[in-house]
Amino acid sequence: MAHPTTTLPQEAASLSQPPSKMDIIFNKSFRSLTYAFTWAMVLLLAAIVIKIGIKAIPAIERHGLAFLTTTTWDVNSQHFGILPEIWGTLYSSLLALILGGFFGITIAIFLTQDFLPHRVEVVLKSIIELLAAIPSVVYGLWGIFVLIPLIRPLADFLHTHLGWLPWFSTSLSGPGMFPAALVLSIMILPTIAAISQDAFRAIPHKTKEAAFGMGTTRWEAILKVMLPAASGGIFGALVLGLGRALGETMALAMLVGNSNQISLSVFAPANTLASLLALNFPEAAEYEVSVLMYAACILLLITLLVNIAGTAIIAMTGSGAKK
Amino acid sequence: MKHAQTAENEFHLPRLERQPFEPRALKSIVLSSITVAAAITACIPLFSVLIMLLYRGGKRLSLEVFYQLPPTAFETGGGFGNAIVGTLFMVGIAALISVPFGILAAIFLAELGPDSKVAITARFCAKIMTGLPSILAGVFAYAAVVVVFKTYSAWAGGIALSLLMIPVVLLTAEEAIKMVPRAMKEAAVGIGCTPAQAMVKVILPVALPGIITGVVLAVARAAGETAPLLFTALFSDYWLKAQEPTASLAVLIYNYSGMPFENQIELAWAASLVLVLMVFLLNIISRTLGGRKKI
């Protein structure tokens, strides 16, 4: 084939060679490597669920569903129940969601509805994003030494004057539900604000212009046109914020008081599933570990459901807005 | 003119110009002020945290906290050099695991099989995992590493942290690879690259800034995590030994915040200042790298 007289120069020949054996092997192994890691991602989540589930089996067999509805946690007599923790988790997250949701959505409106010059908007947006960057343990420290002394006069005032309301029926003795929920709301605010902003930005400009064209004031346009149009994304943002609040550990372990009781009062100490794990795991004996795994299972189940719901809501409304 | 007047009376046309104090204008003003107030209120915690960190942490911060070991109960002085080393070491392990894992999976998700069933499932799993409570990563690492090797260790802590980093790296790397212009990918294939060559020689270098942004953000998040380390790395008063309990800044802050000793509480504030500075620095790096294009 290669006639001596027509041999191309070495360089030209190497320009148009087909992939060498090495190239083909590299290509194949690279592809299968990426494929393998994609599977690994799926298996990793499955492994987490299965591993925690298996470790929990002894406790599930012994305590069954009574574990979820009893209130004692006594290592010596081996009586375990997590009703107060489930209550505390839901109650603190809900309080945080109300506060964080209000501020988060308001800030999203403030940042997307032309209230501010662009530069100020960018600065404010960065400040809100930096709120999310501060580690939760630092918020916990701040909560103990700054926030609790700060809100104690307010708590005392509410307790003495409105003590007949169930929410203020105890005084704030230090750590409690209210400071914990307050810090929690600061922590979920950036999540809610960011996703709500995306929802507002996804609304076509025409929609708002049409509203203004009909003579609405700024707030009539926001409340009656923009908010309903963005409601799907905002709802998703709230659900994902709830997911974060349910699983947050450190700030709660430091601020919620870790008391095994159910109380409607926001100033009473309480406990949550995540802080129960954080506090009891390091010193747990073998059987208690299994009990804690059962509690972890419950937490996993709750957060997985909430997160799947939130992701699905955003996926549905997001693709609907684009097309 | 006269004609217009009669028309107005006949049809009861409202006055169309905006009145400064009509109810709907007032409502608008009130709502705007509430919004401004809410935005300012939301900024207060950040500044309060920063000021307290600088005030209480700055007071205690000196060169020696960076190389001394933690003090015992009634001792004065001391530092948290071992905790800084521990945090860096464990975040390093986590990055070594999660960066290759995340990027390789992201390549498949973005380029090789974006619409395949496994890619869609993996993307969904990654999104769900970003919302996984960090303490559950610790619980898993405890069950999978600590129980098996029968000891708390820096390795277990690093593995727990990597579980939190993998989904972040994966999702941001996927976005970065997707943003590489179609034409460049086609040009690479057009001159005879195999898909793997196109990926390694053309697409990855172009997507690199975006990928690094994601990695740095993930590192920043992992550096501040406490919950996964509480019962995987535990804590130690001595210098790093990877197969034994290891100190970290975050766990040090948590442990010392509950102590009745003034010296320890001051150290907790100083450690918080160091940790927050580290995290903010990483955030600034990732923002600069990410540049104007948002990922």
Image (tube, grey):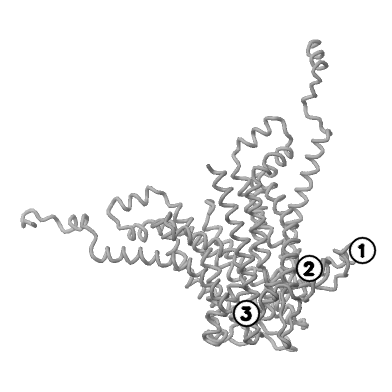
Which residue corresponds to the image point at 79% horizontal and 10% vertical from the top-left? B3
Which residue corresponds to the image point at 53% horizontal and 76% vertical from the top-left? B159
> Are the two marked residues, 1 and 2, in contact with CB atoms closer than 8 angstroms?
no
B8 to A259, vertically: above or below: above
Which residue corresponds to the image point at 60% horizontal and 38% vertical from the top-left? A205
In the rendering, at what x and y percent does residue B24 appear?
80, 35
What residue is shown with label 2?
Answer: A177
CA distance for labels 1 and 2? 18 Å
Of callouts 3 and 1, the N-terminal one: 3
Mark 1 vs mark 2: same chain?
yes
B218 to B9, vertically: above or below: below
What residue is shown with label 3?
Answer: A61
Of callouts 2 and 3, the N-terminal one: 3
The chain identifier of the residue carrying mark 1 reads A
Crowd class of label 1 (few under 14; some 14 to 19; many from 20; radius 10 Å):
few
B288 to B62, vertically: above or below: above
Type of amino acid under label 2: Met
Mark 2 vs mark 3: same chain?
yes
In the rendering, at what x and y percent does residue B27 appear?
80, 40
